[in-house]
Image: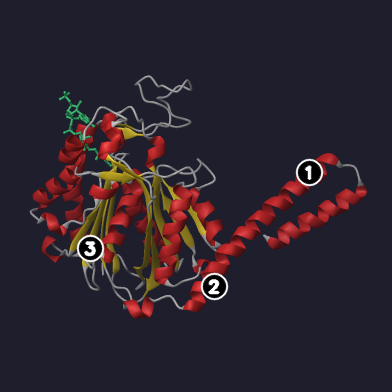
Amino acid sequence: MPGSGTGIYAHIVGWGMAVPEGVLTNKDLEAIVDTNDEWIRARTGIRERRIANERESTATLGYKAAQQALEVADILPAELDLIIVATSTPENIFPSTASLIQDWLGAGRAGAFDLSAACSGFVYGVNMATQAIRSGSIQKALVIGAETMSRVMDWQDRGTCILFGDGAGAVVLQASDVEGGVLSAVLRSDGSGYDLLGIPTVGSQDVDMDKVGANGHKMYKMFMVGGEVFKFATRVIGESVKEALEIAGLGLEDIDLIVPHQANDRIIKSAARSLGLDKNMFMSNVERYGNTSAASIPIALCEAIEQGRVQNGDDLVLVGFGGGLTWASMVVRWGVPEPDLRQATRFSKQRRQISYSVSRWRARSRRWRRQFNLHVTRIHPERGRVIRLRRKIDQYDSEDL
Ligand code: COA
């Protein structure tokens, strides 16, 4: 198997997805911008998208998808070694969304970080996790693609706001000596296209702090040159899929299903044409969710599995493209245990629930202790009794951590 000198393979053994309940239809959009259902459907294939409510965020959606993925994999959060969240809409610049989810899950042994590669981020993340597993340095990783794109839309820009939606998808990868899993990956970037698609934020050279930059981009809002991005996407999908297949020692005829980034149905059709493949070889659910950026591939993968389109032994191709510009393709030989063996036992299900509850309480009590500690030292810094109390708290904190 290419690139697997260690004899260790990284298999996808769990998957999950979460989308907000709130639906925004093309008809609803007609009340917001000068557009219409017919135009949107004809140019993009999108009918509706999901929009997060005020209690939902990138982290809450990612957390739900992660819980499902752990359930399917039937592993405990404490078994995870690594959590990667691919996102362009993180909760904060830092701390990472991955760290928040790590805490909520109670994944006390996992490293966690966010990954920024726009709509290619999920494939980048799965490859990072795969390399760590194949090197033998870790056993189990959780890779999440999660977005609340609705929060970075310029709702006056009809060229972009009609395209995007919110959601999250996640997979668990696990080390195995059984051949298969992630067979190859091609990650690419062309930063000369940085001005075609992006979200300016703090530190941007283009944007002054009065919210509009020299080139007219609004701070924290997405901008896009749609036509150029369209041409870029249709070119790189074909090229990178062929390259990833070649590295895996496979041909187009070996592919059972392609799960592309869900940006636009016309892009998918054009990629199918350029590869000489039937459009049905491509999973598509863009009609119901729009473009959920880094979340779109894992959401589409989950729905393909649900629809029975993925079987053990199948060769799948995941292909993403987006801001950066970035693009990435990956070949995965599906090979997870039979469904009845993967069914979560009630015992481990309960242990996962306990882990989530304990984690919530532990985080609360740590925060409370830190606040109390701070309060005590601020109010009575000179009092010996308080200082002794503070030392005790410090000692307790360091033992706990
Ligand atoms: N509703 C109605 N009319 C619209 C519209 C909307 N939401 N948005 C643009 N238009 C108009 C334009 O103003 C233009 O009008 P004009 O001819 O009078 O000037 C006309 O429709 C055609 O616009 P154009 O931008 O050329 O359309 P298009 O066929 O390129 O489609 C996109 C626009 C955005 C759908 C298309 O370029 C696209 O999908 N690009 C890729 C975007 C993408 O996938 N990005 C994410 C990658 S991760």
Q: Residue at x 17, y 37 (%)?
A: 38
Label 1 sits on what residue type?
His
Question: Mark 3: which amino acid?
Answer: Leu
Tag 2: residue type? Arg
Crowd around label 1: few <14 · some 14–19 · many ≥20 (10 Å) = few
Examine the image and state in which quarter residue 333 appears: bottom left
Counting residues from the start of the chain, the first of labels 3 and 1 encountered is 3
Along the horizontal axis of the image, is 382 left or right of 180?
A: right
Q: What's the residue at 46%, 66% (across, down)?
A: 138
Q: Which residue is label 3 attached to?
A: 316
Mark sitting on residue 375: 1
Residue 285 visible in the current orientation? yes
SS at badge 3: strand
Residue 209 vs 328, above or below: the answer is above
| Residue 32 location (% of width, % of height) | 32, 30
Q: Which residue position is annotated with label 2? A: 351
Cα–Cα span, label 2 and label 3: 33 Å
Residue 57, numbered circle? none
CB at disc 3 and ligand 1 closer than 8 Å:
no
Q: Nearer the viewer, residue 220 or 392?
A: 220
Return the x and y of residue 95 as percentages of the image width and height.
Answer: 54, 46
**Camera-side residue of 192 and 102:** 102
Tell which tag, 1 or 2, sits nearer the viewer.
2
Residue 51 screen position, x and y as percent: 38, 44
As drawn, the residue found furthest toward the right would be 384
Within the displayed image, which quadrant is ligand 1 positioned in? Answer: top left
Quadrant in the rendering for residue 192: top left
Q: Is residue 9 left or right of residue 245?
A: right
Give the spatial CA distance, label 1 vs label 2: 36 Å
Disc number lying in front (3 or 1)? 1
Q: Check contact, mark 2 vs mark 3: CB within 8 A.
A: no
